[in-house]
Amino acid sequence: MRRNENYSLNTDIYIILLLVCSIMTAIFVGISSNLMILNCVFLAITCFLVLITYFLGLLAGLIFNLLFVFIQGSYVLYADVVLGKELDLWLIVWIFLPLIWSLLVSFMTRNLQKLQEENLSLRESNARNLGYNSETDLRTMRSYRQDAEVFIETHKRFDIPVSTGIISIRYFHQIMNILTEEQQHHLIKRLSDILSESFRNNDIVYSIDGVGGVP
């Protein structure tokens, strides 16, 4: 839970930094309106570098950013030394803006992924600690162990017959792999209803393997 709160706080910080960076970029583009065409070109390149970072990772993003800095620096030197053109100093800002955007997007994406993993882990942990799965109407393996201890002890004391039956569905895991999570829950729910209708009122149905990663 503590780590979850830290991830949430970090996500809020990255969102605020992205907003600040967006405002700074907008102000910079507005101030340097005389370089509107170049600003649009560099802004498009920045969006491209951000997408590269988002889909391919931070390392790929840094490589492309360094390549962009090298090309831009080479052009500045060529224009200044060979062509003798005096370039606007505002263009130097575009050397750092794409890198800042790429770093912020990468850190926020990584933090969101960790937050999602932590939430999924908490959900699975909570489901394992519960004795009943409300989505499938089945008792869990934890409940089975607890009930088994009670029934076995009752059998020893009062000599009441106790039996356990296991129903195995052929190619069950292969079938579950080709279904979505919602379809998996629907299938388990349907199987649970069929078994409940077929058994006696005092029989209890459990899910041993579980569904959706929950036992």
Image (cartoon, rainbow, N blue to C red):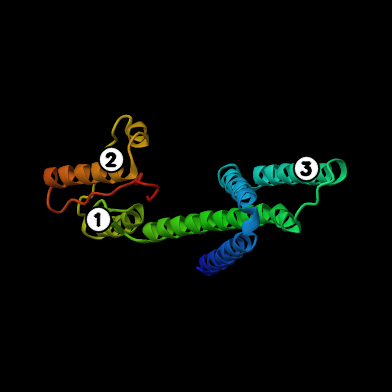
Q: Where is residue 200 in the image (x, y as percent from the top left)?
A: 12, 48
Q: Which of 188 and 84 is in front in this view?
A: 84
Say whether disc 2 or disc 1 marks the residue closer to the N-terminus: 1
Task: Tell me the CA gap for discs 2 and 1.
Answer: 20 Å
Mark 3 vs mark 1: give the one in front: 3
Q: Where is residue 157 in the image (x, y as percent from the top left)?
A: 25, 60
Q: How crowded is mark 1: few (under 14 residues within 10 Å), some or many (20 or more)?
A: few
Q: Where is residue 76 in the image (x, y as percent from the top left)?
A: 79, 46
Mark 2 vs mark 3: give the one in front: 3
The reply to whether the C-beta atoms of the residues labelled 2 and 1 are less than 8 Å apart is no
Residue 75: mark = 3
Considering the numbered disc 2 on the image, is that residue within a helix, a strand or a loop?
Answer: loop
Residue at 55% from the left image edge and 43% from the top image edge: 55
Q: Which amino acid does label 3 sit on?
A: Tyr
Residue at 80% from the left image edge and 51% from the top image edge: 86
Task: Tell me the CA gap for discs 3 and 1.
Answer: 87 Å
Considering the numbered disc 3 on the image, is that residue within a helix, a strand or a loop?
Answer: helix
Q: What residue type is labelled 2?
A: Ile
Residue 96 lies in quadrant: bottom right
Q: Position of residue 46 (x, y in %)?
A: 61, 49
Q: Which of 177 and 160 is in front in this view?
A: 177
Residue 155: mark = 1
Q: Which residue extends farthest right? A: 81
Say whether disc 3 or disc 1 marks the residue closer to the N-terminus: 3
Residue 164 lies in quadrant: top left
For label 2, the residue is 166
Above or below, 42 against 157 in this view is above
Residue at 44% from the left image edge and 55% from the top image edge: 120
Q: How crowded is mark 2: few (under 14 residues within 10 Å), some or many (20 or more)?
A: few
Above or below, 152 against 175 in this view is below
Mark 2 vs mark 1: give the one in front: 2
